[in-house]
Image (cartoon, rainbow, N blue to C red):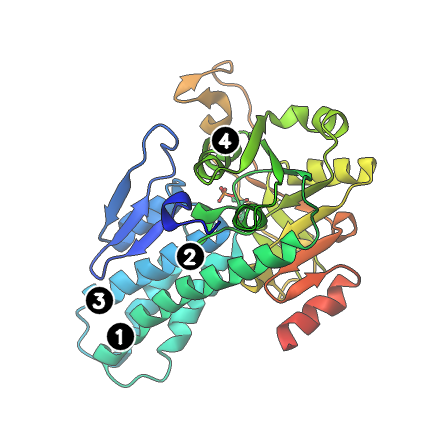
Amino acid sequence: MALNDFSIPRSVIWKDESISLLNQQNIPHVTEYLDLTTVEEVWDAIQTLKVRGAPAIGITAAFGLALAALQDSSETIEEFKLTIKKKRDYLASSRPTAVNLFWALDRLVACIADVKSINEGKTRIVQEAIQIQIEDEKVCRLIGEHALSVFNDGDRIMTICNAGSIATAKYGTALAPFYLAKEQNKELKVFACETRPVLQGSRLTTWELMQAGVDVTLITDNMAAHTIKSKNISAIIVGADRIAANGDTANKIGTFNLALLANAFNIPFYVAAPLSTFDPSIANGEQIPIEERNPKEVTELNGVQIAPEGVKVFNPAFDVTPNNLIAGIITEKGIISDNYQEEITQLFNR
Ligand code: MRU
């Protein structure tokens, strides 16, 4: 059975003079598409998690820079390039951890390096942004095919956060194998951790998988160990926000806990991510900047205060899983699993 476009939601749509963006803040209660027309609105959408997930952030930022380019009224090509560079830096300041943001923006800046006219510059930036989204869809499908090869029909698999269709151009990374399994009439059962504090697991992963008819069961994060044991979980698969040159991986807070549990239960812990999520310029996970977000994400639930007024809060949005806990990193070019340092270098030279 081929899944049609209606059963796999999309988060970002380029409309030539605006961006239509699925507002992930209010899912599952409200499904609304926002019309973004300025670079400031795009910055805000990324910062406030209206769009989130590493590849989707990169795609949205690229379209934001495309809007800025189209709206620019520079008189010389030098002035145009300088403006694009400034808007690139502005958009890059929206969130610090997912490297796809910087990767996509830098790709757009690079694509106008040799242009001689402003019109050509505008056309190239728009085309490159569209191309980034097209490529991401293909890449996610390939990741899904590779990931599906490590699972067996009937497997029960745990995940955290949302590394699904709405976190990418389509299909997702960690969730891609579940869509492809559905297409091939294979039954994979997903156990989704709710993912405190922002609840990407309970609000988004369940929402998108249920629409595609994928068997998904929601648990709270502190049920993971008991669930792995009592529900016979055979593997854990997660997405990534940034992978260092040695394979250390930053992903949503709570991922490291799951990697430790996988190790304790002797089940494989997989990371699924495109090459655009690797950052070979940094040696290891220690150097990955970890975003700390508003304490209200922890002290409030749906705008209702649940902790004592004035309590001290630590709210890191991501953690780093060391490479030795990762059974395999599943990319569009295949699965790497042995010497990450060497294999990551090879991935970029293939
Ligand atoms: O804070 P978020 O929701 O942007 O965090 C998202 C994640 O941690 C995802 O797992 C990661 O970006 C991969 S999305 C394919």
Report which residue position mark 3 lands on.
70
The secondary element bearing badge 4 is classed as loop
**Residue pointed to by mark 4:** 199
- The residue drawn where x is 19% and y is 64% is 71
Which residue position holds label 2? 92
**Amino acid type, residue under disc 4 in the picture:** Leu
> What's the amino acid at mark 3?
Leu
Q: Residue at x 62, y 40 (%)?
A: 188
Mark-to-mark CA distance, 4 and 2:
24 Å
Give the numbered dot on residue 123: 1
Q: Residue 26 in the image: state x and y as whole percent.
A: 36, 32
- Give the SS element for disc 2: helix
Across and down, in percent, residue 187 comes to 61, 41
Q: CA distance from mark 4 to mark 3?
A: 36 Å
Q: Amino acid at mark 1?
A: Thr
**Left or right: where does residue 239 sit relative to residue 236?**
left
**Mark toward the viewer: 2 or 1:** 1
Along the horizontal axis of the image, is 23 left or right of 151? left
Query: Mark 1: few, some, or many residues within 10 Å (few <14, many ≥20)?
Result: some
